[in-house]
Image (cartoon, grey):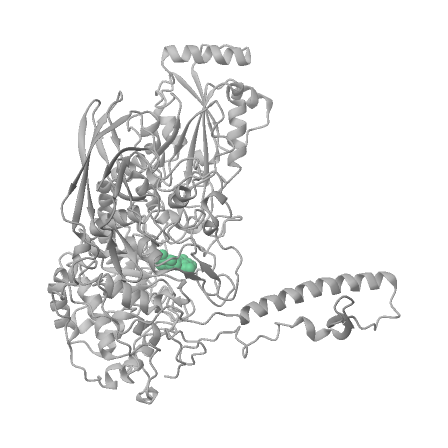
């Protein structure tokens, strides 16, 4: 194989992989005209400086042309100049392409099999892998191509040794593209519950459904994007804009999923913070953007939650589309070999996001273990970067056999680790649903144009069990009460008699009309209703009807979606309450409607904001939101309802469904807006869960998993999505470092509308009696890295015979399907292979590593903080105590004002007091020291632990 030796092996101009950079000098497209080519240069003197300047003048060939014609030509010319100048500018930018691979090299890939927790699985895997042919090994690492199986991703089996084809399916909120499944609330709603048990339970239920549908690997949970940019399109798939919250929620979800024997995938590693320019060509550019992150920020923010998932035993990590420090994540040896596999001691396998692999040999060396969906640089063309190329690369030594063996062993070990070798639980069958058709019969390889017989692909197996209960609990507990001025909870009969009388008196004074009939409630907004049905747009890629989830691969086909209006119709006592429904985004203009609205005694307005994955757009929402405004005329709708409901004197409740923070400044302080609920993305049980909270069956206990600012500007310059590229490889510098979301607001003393962690209840809580109990003495560095608890398997180093990868005689290949086979032995050329720069430099093993999840000392508890909490209000409810840590200062090191380092959720009866404790580990107490290249605890000065109900409502303080 021929290649040039860029550091990370990013294959610029790499023949074998068919990769062409069409914007480099040589490959310049003839349509890229230089503005100067059509102009006549004349030289003129600059009057001031006397220097000779170059200016341009037009030749004058149009002397016979009339005035009109000249004007027209001038206009045409002017337009042309502007376009050409733009082209020249862009061309210049494209030639300023940054050097690839600025991320430091880290080779070779640490082998899996060092952790005691995985030792048995590696032993079993070694026995199986040792018997595999080269073709079988390649099969296991390479997807068969887009739409070649029934799931969104399938590799190929190693039939003779008994390793099945794995079925990989999205996504984080349910089984994508499947029938009879549960549409769980999205990650952001789960984060808003702050309830570890529910995080676990949702993961477990999700996995039970995966199992029932024949899925081996779930493509979730998602902890990246982290939420650097509040308008980022996919933030809602994760759990909130804080690494600790993401880490806990991600780890609990992984544990829940894997308790059922399903492999979880933590994604997207790392820094896929926005959709614009996330991958080549999708946004017109030949490259993805590069997220440029410094070492400390990477450790303390973006990689942090992945550490929790690895510690929890996650089977798989999905590397992201974007580049990090100008090297594609899936070919970034520092990230995959260095941080993930050495420092974090990851024992499972790294899988590429769909087409995130951008080079063949380079990614193998950098630590990628499985490529998905198997196609190469383009969707569905069957031209894999691995498959036959990997076979050949192993035969000619450009990918060391040892590396291939490690890839395969990691995948097979993960399969054993989850117990999927047990055929009674995991029969070797394709999934019982197809991602590509809803019909019973369908093609086994939908993506191949080769003739095939239809088979039964959809068996319509119902796997929902009673999971709607969990879905409803998560949705209810994930609903955040943002404002409540003595209004909620309301009664199913309207208002109690005394309150009703007062209210009617007020309305009477405002309108001059009195009525003694039923209590009149108005419901407003398209978001309250069913719209055209929950699955109206493909992949949920539009905002219509009530918003239950964002869009993209993280969304599912709703089996049903309880629209809020349906639940309210059912729950309000129709003998006492008269409902008026205006399921539209503005007020009706007819005079009778107007009169009716003026008589309403309570109005509930539904508004929302949607976003999703960048492969599809809705209006001006191209994946990422264009701003933080409510969509579908939301602000105006709330404003006009507030002004008109009971002629502006009746109470208004606003319900928000949203993918992330929205601006509420235009109306939140209006006097008759008495209550605001943020129901996040509630999934199928939307209306039921909302009713639970509105009527007080569930006392709200959701808390904000992000900051709600008063403007996007308030989040800082780093919080803005890059909507226009700043180069051929857009450079996104994470120069705000650690200061995102509440860390930014705190550092700059900015008043948010509502702070991270905020959430009201129908009761009140008192915090007292904080105790700080040291468990171990402070010391700067963790204990020395332990020796590996187990030894990675070793295999024969003899290069297998080429016969192992020749197309078997009489083999009928499907078009576009990715096979491991070569046509003939001649394809193999053996030349000295130039490994990437830095390949032979031995890397020091990380002092932060040594076991699954890193150095075990990092997970030791060093101090415990306990606090007493009393329910001092009038009804039972759950409290979310949150612990924020302030580091002691250290010369030359900047620390955030506070960082979340503990939370819990505790249910307290009225009057009950309980004590809650927070264990702080060495990692929790440390910062990443870039010189030490390790987590460092501060031994001088005092740590401050503040415990309260939000990042700004801190009620008790302890020191250590
Ligand atoms: C998404 C992943 C998803 C994959 C498979 C990609 O476009 O980024 O999150 O798992 O597709 O559908
Ligand atoms: C597919 C998704 C995939 C996405 C990636 C879409 O066409 O439906 O599964 O995640 O492309 O961009």
Q: Can residue 455 be seen?
A: no
Relative horizontal placement of residue 246, taking residue 644 as reference (left or right): left
- The image position of residue 485, as x and y in percent, is 40, 22
- The image position of residue 459, as x and y in percent, is 27, 53
Task: Work out which quarter of the rendered image holds the C terminus and state it.
Answer: top left
Task: Work out which quarter of the rendered image holds the N terminus and state it.
Answer: bottom left
Determine the residue positioned at 40% across, 52% down.
552
Numbered circles on residues, count: 0
Relative horizontal placement of residue 916, taking residue 458 as reference (left or right): left
Would you identify the image quadrant in which residue 693 lies?
Answer: top left
Assign ligand 2 to one image quadrant: bottom left
Q: Is residue 25 above or below residue 943?
A: below
Determine the residue positioned at 35% across, 32% down.
690
Would you identify the image quadrant in which residue 812 lies?
Answer: bottom left
**Of residues 847 and 189, the one drawn nearer to the viewer in this rendering:** 847
- The image position of residue 681, as x and y in percent, is 37, 41
**Of residues 397 and 928, the one drawn nearer to the viewer in this rendering:** 928
Q: Can residue 438 be seen?
A: yes
Q: Is residue 743 above or below residue 274?
A: above
- The image position of residue 63, as x and y in percent, is 88, 70
């Amino acid at each position: 194989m021929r290649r040039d030796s860029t550091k990370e092996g990013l294959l610029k101009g790499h023949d074998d992989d068919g990769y062409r950079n069409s914007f480099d000098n040589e490959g310049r497209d003839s349509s890229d005209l230089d503005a100067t080519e059509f102009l006549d240069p004349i030289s003129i003197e600059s009057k001031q400086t006397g220097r000779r300047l170059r200016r341009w003048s037009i030749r004058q060939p149009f002397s016979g042309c009339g005035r009109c014609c000249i004007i027209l030509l001038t206009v045409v010319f002017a337009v042309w100049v502007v376009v050409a100048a733009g082209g020249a500018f862009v061309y210049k930018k494209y030639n300023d392409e940054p050097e690839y691979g600025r991320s430091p090299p880290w080779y070779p890939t640490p082998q899996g099999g060092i952790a005691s927790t995985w030792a048995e699985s590696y032993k079993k895997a070694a026995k199986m892998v040792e018997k595999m042919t080269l073709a079988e090994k390649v099969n296991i690492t390479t997807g068969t191509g887009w739409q070649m199986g029934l799931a969104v991703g399938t590799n190929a089996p190693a039939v003779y040794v008994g390793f099945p084809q794995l079925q990989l399916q999205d996504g984080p909120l349910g089984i994508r593209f499947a029938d009879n499944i549960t549409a769980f609330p999205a990650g952001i709603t789960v984060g808003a519950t702050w309830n570890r048990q529910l995080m676990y339970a949702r993961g477990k239920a999700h996995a039970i459904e995966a199992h029932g549908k024949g899925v081996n690997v779930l493509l979730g949970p998602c902890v990246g994007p982290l939420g650097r940019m509040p308008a980022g399109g996919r933030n809602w798939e994760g759990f909130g804009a804080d690494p600790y919250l993401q880490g806990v929620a991600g780890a609990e979800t992984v544990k829940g999923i894997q308790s059922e024997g399903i492999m979880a995938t933590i994604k997207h590693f790392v820094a896929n913070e926005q959709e614009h320019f996330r991958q080549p060509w999708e946004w017109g550019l030949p490259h993805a953007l590069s997220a440029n992150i410094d070492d400390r920020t990477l450790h303390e923010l973006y990689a942090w939650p992945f550490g929790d998932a690895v510690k929890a035993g996650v089977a798989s990590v999905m590397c992201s589309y974007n580049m990090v420090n100008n090297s594609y994540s899936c070919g970034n040896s520092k990230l995959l070999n260095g941080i993930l596999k050495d420092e974090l001691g990851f024992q499972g396998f790294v899988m590429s996001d769909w087409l995130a692999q951008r080079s063949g040999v380079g990614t193998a060396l950098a630590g990628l273990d499985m490529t998905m969906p198997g196609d190469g640089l383009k969707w569905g063309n069957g031209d894999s970067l691995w498959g036959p190329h990997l076979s050949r690369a192993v035969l000619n030594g450009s990918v060391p056999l040892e590396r291939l063996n490690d890839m395969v062993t990691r995948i097979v070990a993960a399969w054993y680790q989850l117990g999927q070798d047990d055929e009674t639980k995991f029969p070797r069958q394709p999934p019982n649903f197809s991602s590509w058709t809803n019909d019973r019969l369908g093609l086994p390889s939908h993506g191949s144009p080769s003739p095939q017989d239809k088979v039964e692909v959809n068996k319509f197996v119902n796997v929902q069990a009673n999971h709607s209960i969990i879905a409803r609990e998560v949705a209810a507990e994930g609903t955040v009460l943002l404002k409540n001025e003595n209004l909620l909870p309301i009664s199913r009969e309207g208002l109690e008699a005394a309150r009703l009388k007062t209210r009617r008196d007020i309305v009477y004074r405002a309108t001059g009309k009195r009525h003694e009939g039923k209590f009149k409630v108005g419901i407003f907004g398209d978001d309250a209703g069913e719209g055209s049905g929950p699955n109206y747009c493909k992949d949920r890629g539009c905002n219509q009807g009530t918003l239950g989830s964002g869009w993209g691969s993280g969304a599912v086909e709703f089996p049903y979606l309880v629209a809020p209006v349906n639940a309210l119709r059912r729950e309000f006592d129709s003998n006492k309450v008269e409902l008026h429904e205006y399921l539209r985004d503005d007020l009706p203009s007819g005079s009778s409607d107007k009169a009716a609205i003026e008589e309403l005694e309570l109005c509930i307005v539904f508004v929302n904001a949607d976003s999703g994955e960048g492969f599809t757009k809705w209006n001006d929402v191209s994946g990422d939101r264009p701003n933080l405004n409510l969509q579908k005329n939301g602000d105006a709708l709330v404003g006009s309802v507030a002004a008109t409901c009971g002629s502006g004197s009746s109470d208004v409740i606003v319900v928000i469904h949203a993918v992330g923070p929205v601006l509420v400044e235009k109306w939140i302080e209006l006097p008759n807006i008495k209550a605001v609920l943020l129901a996040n993305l509630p999934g199928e049980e939307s209306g039921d869960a909302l009713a639970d909270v509105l009527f007080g069956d569930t006392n709200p206990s959701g808390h904000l998993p992000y900051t709600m600012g008063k403007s996007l500007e308030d989040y800082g310059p780093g919080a803005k999505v890059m909507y226009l590229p700043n180069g051929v490889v857009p450079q996104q510098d994470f120069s705000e470092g650690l200061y995102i979301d509440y860390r930014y607001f705190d550092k700059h003393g900015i008043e948010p509308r509502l702070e991270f962690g905020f959430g009201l209840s129908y009761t009140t809580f008192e915090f007292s009696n904080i105790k700080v109990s040291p468990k171990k003495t402070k010391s700067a560095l963790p204990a020395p890295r332990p020796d590996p608890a187990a030894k990675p398997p070793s295999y024969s180093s003899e290069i297998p015979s080429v016969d192992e990868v020749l197309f078997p005689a009489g083999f009928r290949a499907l078009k576009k399907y990715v096979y491991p086979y070569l046509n003939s032995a001649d394809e193999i050329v053996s030349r000295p292979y130039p490994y990437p720069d830095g390949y032979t430099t031995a890397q020091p093993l990380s002092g932060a590593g040594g076991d699954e999840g890193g150095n075990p000392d990092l997970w030791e508890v060093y101090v415990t903080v306990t606090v007493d909490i009393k329910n001092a209000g009038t009804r039972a409810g759950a409290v979310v105590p949150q612990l924020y840590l302030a580091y002691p200062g250290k010369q030359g090191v900047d620390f955030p004002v506070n960082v979340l380092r503990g939370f819990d959720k505790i249910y307290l009866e009225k009057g009950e007091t309980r004590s809650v404790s927070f264990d702080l580990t060495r990692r929790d107490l440390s910062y990443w020291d870039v010189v030490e290249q390790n987590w460092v605890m501060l031994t001088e000065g005092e740590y401050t632990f503040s415990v309260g109900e939000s990042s700004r409502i801190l009620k008790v303080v302890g020191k250590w």
